Image (spheres, rainbow, N blue to C red):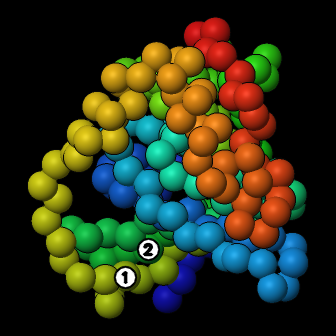
Amino acid sequence: MGKLYERIDGRLRTFIEEQPVFFTATAPLSGDGHVNLSPKGRAGTLVVVDDQQLAYLDFGGSGAETIAHVRENGRITLMWCAFSGPPKIVRIHGEGEAVFRDDPRWPELIGLFGAADGPGARAVIVVRARRIAEVCGYAVPFMDYQGERTLHSEHLARKTDEEFAAYCEKKDHIATSLDGLPALPLPLPARTV
């Protein structure tokens, strides 16, 4: 039996913050456009800002479909599922916004992530919840969490800001999505914080 929530608080907030992985889903308005579904990890890269809003770090290393889709239409769904403990799936359907390095809100937002921030952060995705739902996770398997993978953060930590900007510019589907939508603004703004 599913349950709807008006806000993210109490045990729901705790559940979200304790999960080592979550998933994001976005899509363009075009009916024949590519739906994007991405796993997200790295401890500390998602924060519950308040009872209606979350934010997570968007790092380099992959495409920019999520950025392109939220820039076009704002639709985004975040999902967490329990791989240990009681079975549960939580979905937050919301309105997403990509906040880039040159946005005046960047210093405040990036400060929410403390030590999880890194040189590869190219945007903060802010999500305002429109629908918060919990359903059973009876079919989700038990899985053991072994720890964080460090390859991504180590790889990006070796790059200067200029090298990271050049890395972003040479990758396919960074400035535009698979469907040709504007994605990450290039040249990548320099980090000021």
Give the crowd class for mark 1: few <14, some 14-19, many >=20 residues within 10 Å: some
Locate residue 167, reporting x and y percent.
Answer: 53, 35
Q: Can residue 48 be seen in this view?
A: no
Q: Quadrant of residue 178?
A: bottom right
Locate residue 44, reporting x and y percent.
Answer: 39, 36
35 lies above or below 188: below
Which residue is outermost to the top?
192
Type of residue at label 1? Gly
Comparing 185 with 89, the one in front is: 185
Which residue is painted at 52% across and 27% down in the image?
164
165 lies above or below 176: above
Which residue is painted at 26% across and 70% down in the image?
83
Q: Helix, strand or loop at disc 1?
A: loop
Check residue 93 in the rendering and tell me which mark sits there, or answer none: none
Q: Are marks 1 and 2 in contact (CB under 8 Å)?
A: yes
| Label 1 or label 2, whichever comes before in sequence order | 2
Type of residue at label 2? Ile
User: Is residue 49 toward the left or the right of residue 73 in the image?
Assistant: left
Q: In which quarter of the image is residue 186?
A: top right
3D distance between C-alphas at marks 1 and 2: 5 Å
Q: Can residue 167 be seen in this view?
A: yes
Comparing 63 with 49, the one in front is: 63
Locate residue 47, reporting x and y percent.
Answer: 50, 38
User: Is residue 23 toward the left or the right of residue 153 in the image?
Assistant: right
Give the crowd class for mark 2: few <14, some 14-19, many >=20 residues within 10 Å: some
Residue picked out by circle 2: 89
Residue picked out by circle 1: 137
Q: Helix, strand or loop at disc 2?
A: strand
190 lies above or below 99: above
Locate residue 72, reporting x and y percent.
Answer: 86, 57
Q: Quadrant of the C terminus?
A: top right
